[in-house]
Amino acid sequence: MSMDIYVLDRSFNVLDVISVYESILWKQVLNEPGTFKAEFVYTDRMNRHLQRGNLLYKTDEDEPAVITRKYLRLNKDGEQFITIKGYMASRYTHQRIIWKTMVMRGTPEQIMYQMVREQIVEPEDESRRMPNVVLGEYHGYAGDEIEKQISYRNLQESLTEVSKGPELGYRMRLDLTARKLIFEVYQGEDRTLGTEKPCIFSRKYQNIYTQEYSEDDSNYGNVCLVGGPGEGSERVLESAGRAEGLDRYEIFYNASGFTRHEEDEAVLRRQLVQKGNEKLAAFYIAKAFESKINKAKSMEFALGDFVTCMDEEWGIMENTQVKSIQKGYSKTEQSFVVTFGDDVPTLVNLMKAKE
């Protein structure tokens, strides 16, 4: 049940190949960098190579992981262990902010590539460039053009914000031969019931071991009032979303830092509406299936795909997106846990959504 894991330095030179481990959890996430945790029996060689900043690469995954935390442990029996944790390589985008102000117009895919190009691949200041990162293929995913203005915000959080509305994913795929990380935007396939190649998860098909389903509207919002620049009656106000009566849930977003376009105020107003729509994406009704999958009986699917989850006894059928995949490995077993739909927002995520 073992597999080979490459340990790489930051230039993607192979330092070691590991095939013996205590446990590994490898979690891919659609709209943000995934995470990992791994535990090994201590050896001097492992201790030298498993350093913060180095990477782990599983050849069956597109994206390597960066070690950001390391723990050494001695138990009462004198046994020593190394535990490391970290993020998928797309976390490198968290090391950059939007330097100055970017004013952009285009599809979400175009804007995501533009942000990475100007802040990482071809920045004005050469010291901000990440030399081993290149842009991947532009796919031309369908989507309405949006107006976007961002100043001084974290790049990774900005990518996540733009990607959530059109339900896109992003990653940094490793080309080990070229020693390059390729920034890619990707879109899942429709595999819901009734399509040519459906993927259905249900007790009926015996392709799940356990499952949990939750619904929560405690942090829901569907109308956002956005306050732009100006004061009092001169302040520019726009709203995003529509609802009325008891079905209307209002939130406010302060966008007073946006730049006023004297020559064309319509540009500013479109930017404010776009910002309102992005904020509403974080205040959703959380509907989530979390299922431990019987991989041997599951149908073909990938992160970002739209699939059908159904349980006749519970009276639930949801066409939903695969938002995360967590693979677990130990000496004796493997696990495969998939989250469909969105978990309830955490306090930290809500605080960021209100910024």
Image (cartoon, grey):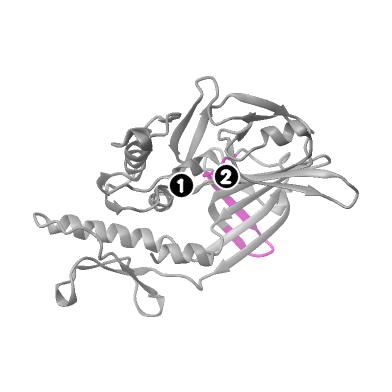
Tell me the kind of residue under disc 1.
Answer: His
Residue 314 among magenta residues: yes
Give left or right: position of 108 versus 256: right
Which residue is found at the position 73% from the left and 34% from the top? 46
Q: In the picture, residue 66 is in which quadrant?
A: top right
Residue range in magenta is 301-317
User: Which circle's residue, 1 or 2, is located before the other in the chain?
Assistant: 2
- Contact flag, marks 1 and 2 (Cβ < 8 Å): yes
Give left or right: position of 51 versus 279: right
Q: Residues within 10 Å of mark 2 (few under 14, many from 20)?
A: many
Residue 272 percent coordinates (x, y): 26, 61
The residue sitting at the left extreme is: 263
- Can residue 188 be seen at all in this image of the molecule? no
Q: Is residue 8 above or below residue 159?
A: above
Q: Is residue 74 above or below residue 259?
A: above
> Where, quadrant-wise, is the C terminus in this rendering?
bottom left
Q: Which mark is residue 94?
A: 1
Q: Which residue is mark 2?
A: 87
> Where, quadrant-wise, is the N terminus in this rendering?
top right
